[in-house]
Image (cartoon, rainbow, N blue to C red):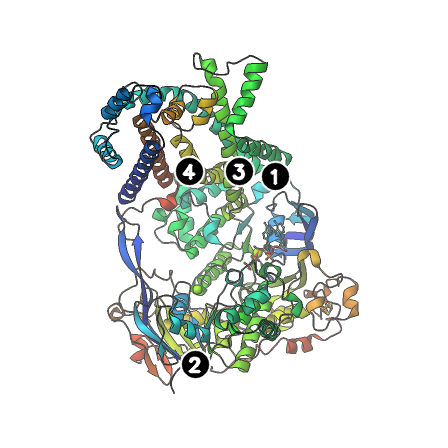
Amino acid sequence: METLLSIEDLAIDFDQGKRFVRALHGVSLTVARGEVLGVVGESGCGKSITWLAALGLLGSRARISGSVQLNGQEIAGAPENDLAGLRGGRIAMIFQDPSSSLNPVHRIGRQIVEALKLHRGMTGASADAEAARLLDRVGIANATRRLREYPHEMSGGMNQRIMIAMALAGEPDLLIADEPTTALDATIQAQILDLLTELRRDSGMALVLISHDLGVVADMSDRVAVMYGGRVIEEADTGSLFDSPAHPYTKGLIAALPDIDGPRRRLESIPGTVPAPDRLPPGCSFAPRCAIASKICDARMPAFLPYGESQSHFAACVKCRDEKPAESARLSGNKHVLVPA
Amino acid sequence: MSALLQAKDLKRHYEVHIPEGLFGRKASLKAVDGVSFSIEKGRTLGLVGESGCGKSTTAKLVLGLIPATAGTVEFAGTRVTARHDAQWRAMRRRMQMIYQDPLGALDRRLPVITQIAEPFEIHNPEMLAAERTERSALLMESVGLRPDMAMRYPHELSGGQRQRVVIARALALEPDLLVCDEPVSALDVSIQAQVLNLLDDLRERTGFAALFISHDLKVVRQMSDRVAVMYLGRIVESGLPEEVFRRPQHPYTKALVSAIPTPARRGKRERIVLEGDPPSPVDVPSGCSFHTRCPIAQASCRNEVPQLVTSGGHAVACHLVNAGAAPAAQAAE
Amino acid sequence: MVQYLLMKIFRALVTVTLIVSAAFVVLRLSGDPAIIILGPEAPPEAFEAFRRNWGLDQPIWVQYFKYFVAVAQGDLGNSMRDGRSALVVVGERIPLTLAITLPALFIKLAIGLPAGVVAALYRNTWVDRLIMMLSVAGFTVPSFVLGLVLAMIFAVWLGWLPSGGSDTWAHAVLPTVTMGLVGAAVIARFTRSAMLEVLGQPYIRTASAKGLLWRNVVRSHALPNAAIPTLTIIGFLVGSLVAGAVVVESVFSWPGVGRLLVNAVANRDLAVVQVILLLVGLTMVGANLAVDILYGIVDPRLRIKRLQAGS
Ligand SMILES: Nc1ncnc2c1ncn2[C@@H]1O[C@H](COP(=O)(O)OP(=O)(O)OP(=O)(O)O)[C@@H](O)[C@H]1O
Ligand SMILES: Nc1ncnc2c1ncn2[C@@H]1O[C@H](COP(=O)(O)OP(=O)(O)O)[C@@H](O)[C@H]1O
Ligand code: SF4
Ligand code: SF4
Ligand SMILES: [Mg+2]
Ligand SMILES: [Mg+2]
């Protein structure tokens, strides 16, 4: 598949006044044209900043190194003018809290038209008509009237639809959705996920879906990257990742999740907590919480290597290569026991 | 068997001012609108529903933190009122609460051990300082906090550890009932599992009953002996978790259950997607309040409020289901 | 909304009444205007005549009651000093005060707003630190000290400007600049924090993510939002146009309302003090109302929802 965006060895340090703290430690990820990449991990693991940095949206307090290529063209460190042209055009982004992500003092219409003008040079009546069409496209009734309303007159779900309409304005090749449903209720989450699936089917745009919810990611993605402590620690096709997770952290996450189907079982919790970015252990950053950690884990951060037969499953753990994939599937819990009706 | 906690037809309406027209208008916001349930000793009732459906209000009504507009709550045979007299305080010792935001529930100027010992000071002032310290230390141990954390301040602990402090404090007086309002919603998955397991173990050990509130069906199923599903201030379905979540009857529960994405369901899910947003509790639709979003609503649903009808321990408030006319119950797969 | 405004006006009137009453009591109990105005050596008959003339021989609550009845009838009383209507005495000073406070307001806004915005945009750089250092200096130094320092430099040492009086426009320069600088410091600080708050909002990130250049993000997304809280402080400044110059007028002997107030208090010239207090109260109330109405206009969240057909 043709690579659309590739991130190579991206590292981010934040200026904390007296010193720099590294929040991202060399992340490499690719997104192919039209695919859905799920990014999952607990809060603070670097999901958001990876993509904000790729778009140059992190601000001056972040020091960024590494390479970001769009269609083979380097965009990391590109001049602000060039980056601004890409943002909202080739690559659009939507965020977690839709209601505060829209400007409270501008009408919905103005905010969408702004994007249309930037990326498609539309103004006046044609821009208004297109904005109404986009609202209609994301399932908002009475589009023309809604254009004259303000974000506070809408529910969270409607505002997220508006954010999506705004993202579609530039006809992007890639949409980065950072926890698009985290702030929404279950039934509204279902609506938004459906909408994203439908839009993708129609336009063929690629989607990066960032979430801390394993279920959402499993449901939507072709491929999944699991992050921990500012690194990608496992990456695989969605099927292999959930059927035969390799990394102890991924297994832990899956086992820690209560299920809605199947028999009730005691949850397997991961002991301890995520270490602070400035207090990572020397070797594998998961070692302090890992049940099978041993001395070799402390030596250095394990390399990100292929796992099992598949050439598309990677994990960063020194132990998971010793153990067979079949066995790890068993460890991942009994989630496949479906209960007959 | 007499229940430990019995809520009967609880209502809580708020007078609100709607900024509409020149002067605005007054309206009644029906946060909780006729909720009945009971919790037996040592059992857990799970309460689920979308935001704004009245879960937290129900919790506050149960504890008598706010007065009810109508209805009654009885705890161990005694009326719980919102008059905070000696009787209420004595009852409050036996009913404790855990909130979603542990940082907000703790005093950031006091070390955590002091806060865990606080209930002893309030409800048992004669207790010797030495005994207080010892009991607090035991509590910390039982919730999995290391002794060296005793003198830390809340902001020096992680979210999961803070929630443990809150749990330890709530359990100090060995309550008979623990009301948990979204206790793990602010926590990460791995920490959430720790806290859920902890609550499970403590319940096993001390035998408290619980009202467990969450918007997350998976979490509620994990923790509850019975569950109740709320929509716009009313319970629309209740029963055993296996029944309610595996064979949901009410169209709302069906949609809710079908909408949960899980790794195991990936790819083979038939999502029932409801249209629109839940209506505002100020403008509760007439008849069945779900009729504006219900995929199988009929004309009669607009006029008559469906009653919660129990059959075999499974209660549903839907005209079609109760008339036996709803499409056959489907298993969640 | 109308109800809300009426409520606000009512509350403001209550406040003004309370202030006026308090002033009445304090001024009456703290000294005898007869002695102050006529001088302690005046003959006893003169005192008596003066007191009878001004009603000072009656019990204080009768005086108080009479005063309010008169005010309600539109009679604000006469100055005890020269017997002219207090309204006229105060009225003729107003233009003089506005002559320095209006240009000072302009200086405050013209320096304070941009300085605050720039400091926020260049947060934690030397630009920000410099502006904030000046700002802190500006409002920790009392205005009479700043006034005296400026007078020292420009009047005493350099001899460019007069240090006191009101004969030419040059006399207005030092008091205006003193007030302007102090006010600019306050506005800069306030604007900076309003702007920082806005720059941290998610919708700013959205604006960047949609492809706007930073300067356009600032112009069309950050500034309109930061303007909303800034309105409050501008309203306050407008409200103090009449009475905000007490200290500066005294320092530079500028014969405005502020200096009149100081003298009237010293003389226990009650009617004049009361007129000034009423004036201050009413401008404050007026400015406050204007801010409220403006809020409703610039912030759609506070705008009244018109009755809409259907939904
Ligand atoms: N601008 C910032 N400066 C400093 N720390 C930040 C900043 N933005 C985020 N953080 C920190 O990064 C961590 C993760 O923040 P983020 O907002 O991405 O949370 P999240 O993953 O979306 O969390 P959740 O899943 O709970 O919503 C938090 O510890 C937060 O305090
Ligand atoms: N502006 C910032 N300044 C300092 N640290 C930051 C900033 N933004 C994010 N971080 C840190 O970077 C790490 C990754 O953050 P983020 O990508 O937001 O996490 P998430 O995976 O939850 O999206 C976290 O440890 C966070 O504290
Ligand atoms: S490298 Fe070691 S510590 Fe890290 S995940 Fe693998 S086994 Fe655990
Ligand atoms: S009563 Fe009617 S509207 Fe309500 S849930 Fe049943 S079918 Fe739907
Ligand atoms: Mg995030
Ligand atoms: Mg709640």
Tag 3 residue: C192
**Vertical placement of residue C76 versus B64, above or below:** above
Q: Can residue A257 be seen?
A: no
Q: Amino acid at mark 3?
A: Arg
Mark 3 falls within which chain? C
* Residue at the image position 30 percent from the left and 36 percent from the top: C21
Q: Position of residue C85 (x, y in %)?
A: 26, 21
Tag 1 residue: A80
Question: Is the C-beta of the residue carrying label 1 under 8 Å from the nearest atom of ligand 2?
Answer: no
**Vertical placement of residue C262 versus A308, above or below:** above
Q: Amino acid at mark 1?
A: Glu
Q: CA distance from mark 4 to mark 3?
A: 14 Å
Q: Are marks 2 and 4 on the same chain?
A: no
Front of the two marks 2 and 4:
4
* Residue at the image position 53 percent from the left and 34 percent from the top: C116
Numbered label attached to residue B240: 2
Q: Are marks 3 and 2 on the same chain?
A: no
Q: Can residue A7 be seen?
A: yes
Front of the two marks 3 and 2:
3
Q: Nearer the viewer, residue C220 or B104?
A: B104
Q: Position of residue B152 (x, y in %)?
A: 62, 62
Q: Position of residue A136 (x, y in %)?
A: 39, 52
Image-based side of C69 in relation to B324, left or right: left
Q: CA distance from mark 3 to mark 2?
A: 57 Å
Tag 4 residue: C232
Q: CA distance from mark 2 to mark 4?
A: 56 Å
Image-based side of A192 in relation to A84, left or right: left
The answer to which image quadrant residue C211 occupies is top right
Q: Are marks 2 and 1 on the same chain?
A: no
